Image: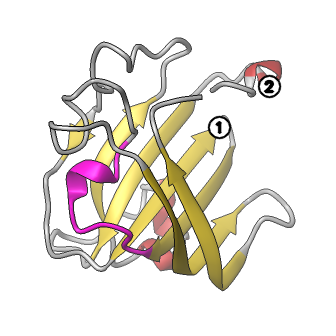
Amino acid sequence: RQGCTALSPSSFSFNVLNQPAILSPLPPSNPLAQIPDAADFQLVYSLDIPSRPTYRSSKPRYSYELGVSGFSRVAYYLQLDDSYVWVSMDAFTDDSRKIGVPCLSLECGDGVNPTIIQQIVSNVNVESNVPGLSGSGLDGNVEFWPYN
């Protein structure tokens, strides 16, 4: 939420998904059901981001968490009030513990070191209800670390 305080959001949620899905398809009432690219993904993490997270001392308090393996793509769905963005890409790791919110606590990531990822990703698809924020088949950069 850092840098978003001027928006005064009433809700801020973060979801991490991966593909291929091994669970049933998303129900039609799910907001992701309106995103065609989301059809073959399964939920791995879900988090309502608090105003003042404490990720130095503990891992995020996910409302849903599923350890998985054998995935080829990763997606992030971020919603701020009524605005959302969906970003999917080729997997940048094969360890589902490293695709959630990075934090300093060793409860995050592999349990040995804080997760730090900085690398180019490919086949990036972006879908949003914010005008001008979309694209497909793009190259991108993932930067995940538990520091400012």
The reply, left or right, for residue 97 in relation to residue 15 is left
Please, is residue 37 above or below residue 54 in the view?
below
Element marked by disc 1: strand
Observer-nearest residue: 105 or 127? 105
Gap in Å between the C-alphas at discs 1 and 2? Answer: 9 Å
Tag 1 residue: 80
Q: How many marks?
A: 2
Query: Badge 1, how many Cα within 10 Å: few under 14, some, many 20+?
Result: some
Quadrant holding the C terminus: top right
Q: Are marks 1 and 2 in contact (CB under 8 Å)?
A: yes
Residue furthest to the front in view is: 113
> Where residue 137 sits: x, y (%)?
62, 88
Element marked by disc 2: helix
Quadrant holding the N terminus: top right
Tag 2 residue: 7
Residue in the picture at 52% in, 11% down: 52
The magenta-colored residue range is 90-100
* Labelled disc at residue 90: none
